[in-house]
Image (spheres, rainbow, N blue to C red):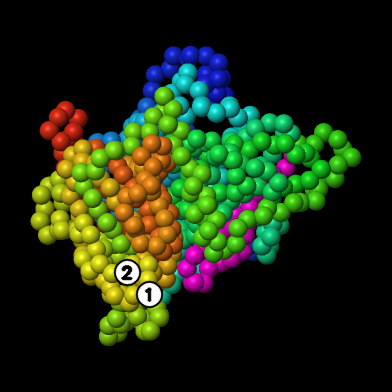
C-alpha cells in the first residue's frame, strides 16, 4: 500500500510528505533451509534469506533495532550509507563498534542524505554476511522524478554465494589451513540457484514481465568472494545508477558487478511470450585460483494470455564473458560516467591536498612452528595494503579514538609503499608483510586522492575496494603501474563506494574527508578481508558547526 501511494506521488503529484522516520525490527536468528538437496542451518535476519528490504526516501531517518538471538557475535553495516556524523552506526566489527553479543541488542540510527538508488546492508563480522544481507532502496524525495523513464515495476536481485554448510566453521578451517577459501556450492539470485544445478529444478527465481513495458532491476552483489558478469538473454540493459548515484544512461549486453556494488538497470521487455529468457550470472576471476565456475540463472518470463502457448516455453540462454575475461571488465569501466546534470552535478575535487599511493598485495607468510601452511611453498596467505596486514583490534578504533584510549592503534599508516618495486612485474619483493593496526589521519575537509595500485604478488587479481562512509569519484584507471595523472576525467567520472581495481592495474579515486570518524577501507572479497586487506582512515573534527563527531548513542555495545 505504502509503495503504491508512493509511486503515485512520485509520478503525478507534489505530495507534501516530509522526510519520515522508518523503524525496523531485525532479529538475528537461525533458519533451516533446504537447497541443492541438502538441509543447512543458516544465520538470518527475521528468518529471511535474503533478508528484509529497507524502503526509504532520501532524507529519511532509519532506525533499526538489531537483536542477536544466535550464538555468534553480530554487527550490521549499511553498505554505502554516508553516515554523516553517525559513524557509530556504521557497523564494521572492532572498527566502529564492538559486536552485539548473544542476547543483546543495539539500535542503529542514521539519516539518508544526498543519495538515491540502491544500497544494501550486511553483517560485518567474519563470514556471516554470506546469509545476513538485504537490500536498501532509497527513492527520491516526494515530487522529485527519476531522471529516466518511470518503470512499470521494479525488482531487487540480490546475488549471493551458497555453501551447504556452516560458514563460520568453514572460515575457521580456512584460517587454520592458511590456504584458499572453500569453493562455494552455487551462486544464487534472490536465494535461488536456478534450474541448472543438481536438485534445483524448482528452486528458481522468476521475473514476470509484460511485453512492451520497461522494468527497473536493482542488482546487488552480496556474494562473499566472487565478482559476476550479469546479463539477460536477447535483451539489452540500460544502466541508470550505481552505488546510489545516477549515471549517464548507457546500454550494454551485460555488466560486471563486484561484491559490494549495486547497479540499477532499465530493461525493456521487447520480446514476447513464445520463449523464456535466462537472467544469468557468470563468475569473473582473474587470478589462477580454484573457484566455482558454474553459472546460475533466473528466468525472465513474459505474460501470456493465449492458452495455446505451452506453460514452459523453450528457454534462451544468456551469453556472458568467460571466467577470466579482464578485457571485458576494463571495457565496461569505460562506459560509466556520472549523470552530471544541473540537478545532480558531479562535484569532482579539482585539487588534491593529500596524495596517497596504496599498493594492494597478496602475501605469503613463512610457516611458523605448529601452523598448517597450505599456501604455495609451505606458506600461509595474508594480504596487505602498503605491506601492512591489518590486525583487528580488541576494542573498536572509533571508541579508542573518542575516549583517547592508548595502545589500540597507531597513526603511522604509510602514505606510500615503504619499499617501492615493480608492482605489476614478476618481482618477488615484499612477499611477506608486516602486521599492524595503523590508521591514516585526515584533516577535516581535506581533498584526498588515492591511487589504488594492483600488484602481481602471489597472483594478479581484480580487487573490489570499498570505502566506508563516502562515495568517491573514479577519476582514472588503467593497466600496469600507475603512470601519473594524465587523462584523468575531472568532469563526469562515476561516483561509487566500491571499485574493482583492474587485475595488475590501478585506479585513481578522489573524495573529500567531510565526515569525522573512523572509516574502513578494504577489499570486499571476504577472504581478502580475512587475510588483512584493509586499513582505516581517521577523519578529525572540523572547527565549524556540525563538524564534530557526537558521542556514542545509548546502548552502544560494550566489548
Ligand atoms: Cu560492504 Cu566494509 O563493507
Residue assigned mark 1: 426
* Crowd rating for badge 2 (residues with CA inside 10 Å; few <14, some 14–19, many 20+): few
Q: From this view, report whether residue 178 is shown above or below residue 240.
A: below
Q: Residue placed farthest to the right in the image?
A: 308
* Crowd rating for badge 1 (residues with CA inside 10 Å; few <14, some 14–19, many 20+): few
Q: Is residue 73 visible?
A: no
Which residue is located at x 55 percent, y 28 percent? 148
Q: From this view, report whether residue 146 is shown above or below residue 397.
A: above
Label placed on residue 422: 2
**Quadrant of the rendering where the N terminus is positioned:** top right
Which residue is located at x 51 percent, y 55 percent? 329
Mark 1 beta carbon near ligand 1 (under 8 Å): no
Residue 284 within the magenta-colored segment of the rendering: yes
Label placed on residue 342: none
Q: Which of 451 and 500 lies nearest the eye of the viewer?
A: 451
Mark 2 beta carbon near ligand 1 (under 8 Å): no
Q: Which residues are magenta?
A: 279-302
**Quadrant of the rendering where the C terminus is positioned:** bottom left
Q: How far across and down, in percent of the image, does residue 543 sit? A: 12, 33
Q: How far across and down, in percent of the image, does residue 31 sit? A: 51, 54
Q: Judging from the image, what secondary structure is the residue with disc 1 in?
A: loop
Which residue is located at x 24 percent, y 63 percent? 417
Amino acid at each position: 500500500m505504502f509503495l503504491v501511494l508512493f509511486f503515485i506521488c512520485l509520478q503525478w503529484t507534489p505530495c507534501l510528505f516530509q522526510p519520515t522516520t522508518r523503524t525496523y525490527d531485525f532479529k538475528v536468528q537461525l533458519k533451516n533451509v533446504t537447497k541443492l538437496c541438502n538441509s543447512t542451518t543458516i544465520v538470518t535476519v527475521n528468518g529471511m534469506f535474503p533478508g528484509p528490504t529497507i524502503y526509504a526516501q532520501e532524507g529519511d531517518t532509519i532506525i533499526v533495532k538489531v537483536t542477536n538471538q544466535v550464538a555468534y557475535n553480530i554487527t550490521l553495516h549499511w553498505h554505502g550509507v554516508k553516515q554523516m556524523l553517525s559513524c557509530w552506526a556504521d557497523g564494521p566489527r572492532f572498527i566502529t563498534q564492538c559486536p552485539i553479543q548473544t542476547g543483546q541488542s543495539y539500535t542503529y540510527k542514521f539519516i539518508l542524505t544526498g543519495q538515491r538508488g540502491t544500497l544494501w546492508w550486511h553483517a560485518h563480522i567474519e563470514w556471516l554476511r554470506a546469509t545476513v544481507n538485504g537490500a536498501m532502496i532509497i527513492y527520491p524525495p516526494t515530487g522529485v522524478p527519476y531522471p529516466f523513464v518511470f518503470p512499470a515495476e521494479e525488482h531487487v536481485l540480490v546475488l549471493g554465494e551458497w555453501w551447504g554448510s556452516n560458514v563460520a566453521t568453514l572460515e575457521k578451517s580456512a584460517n587454520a589451513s592458511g590456504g584458499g577459501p572453500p569453493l562455494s556450492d552455487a551462486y544464487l539470485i534472490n536465494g535461488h540457484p536456478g534450474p541448472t544445478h543438481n536438485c534445483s529444478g524448482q528452486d528458481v527465481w522468476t521475473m514476470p514481465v509484460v511485453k512492451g513495458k520497461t522494468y527497473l532491476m536493482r542488482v546487488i552483489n552480496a556474494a562473499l568472494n566472487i565478482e559476476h558478469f550479469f546479463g539477460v538473454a536477447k535483451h539489452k540493459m540500460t544502466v541508470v545508477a550505481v552505488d546510489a548515484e545516477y549515471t549517464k544512461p548507457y546500454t550494454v549486453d551485460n555488466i560486471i558487478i563486484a561484491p559490494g556494488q549495486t547497479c540499477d538497470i532499465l530493461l525493456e521487455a521487447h520480446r514476447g511470450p513464445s520463449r523464456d529468457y535466462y537472467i544469468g550470472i557468470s563468475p569473473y576471476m582473474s587470478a589462477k585460483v580454484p573457484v566455482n565456475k558454474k553459472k546460475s540463472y533466473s528466468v525472465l518470463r513474459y505474460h501470456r494470455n493465449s492458452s495455446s502457448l505451452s506453460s514452459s516455453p523453450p528457454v534462451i540462454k544468456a551469453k556472458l564473458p568467460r571466467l577470466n575475461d579482464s578485457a571485458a571488465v576494463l571495457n565496461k569501466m569505460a562506459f560509466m560516467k556520472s549523470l552530471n546534470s544541473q540537478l545532480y552535478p558531479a562535484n569532482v575535487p579539482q585539487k588534491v591536498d593529500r596524495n596517497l599511493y596504496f599498493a594492494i598485495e597478496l602475501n605469503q607468510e613463512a610457516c611458523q612452528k605448529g601452523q598448517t601452511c597450505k599456501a604455495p611453498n609451505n606458506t600461509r596467505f595474508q594480504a596487505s595494503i602498503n605491506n601492512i596486514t591489518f590486525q583487528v583490534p580488541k576494542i573498536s578504533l572509533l571508541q579508542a579514538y573518542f575516549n583517547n584510549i592508548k595502545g589500540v592503534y597507531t597513526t603511522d599508516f604509510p602514505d606510500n609503499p615503504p619499499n617501492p618495486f615493480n608492482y605489476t612485474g614478476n618481482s618477488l619483493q615484499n612477499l611477506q608483510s608486516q602486521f599492524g593496526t595503523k590508521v591514516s589521519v585526515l584533516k577535516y575537509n581535506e581533498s584526498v586522492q588515492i591511487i589504488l595500485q594492483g600488484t602481481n604478488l602471489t597472483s594478479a587479481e581484480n580487487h573490489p575496494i570499498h570505502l566506508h562512509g563516502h562515495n568517491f569519484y573514479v577519476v582514472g584507471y588503467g593497466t600496469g603501474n600507475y603512470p601519473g595523472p594524465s587523462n584523468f576525467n575531472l568532469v563526469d567520472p562515476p561516483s561509487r563506494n566500491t571499485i574493482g581495481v583492474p587485475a595488475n592495474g590501478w585506479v585513481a579515486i578522489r573524495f573529500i574527508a567531510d565526515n569525522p570518524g573512523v572509516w574502513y577501507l578494504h577489499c570486499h572479497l571476504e577472504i581478502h578481508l580475512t587475510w588483512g586487506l584493509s586499513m582505516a582512515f581517521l577523519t578529525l573534527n572540523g572547527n565549524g558547526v556540525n563538524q564534530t563527531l557526537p558521542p556514542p548513542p545509548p546502548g552502544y555495545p560494550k566489548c
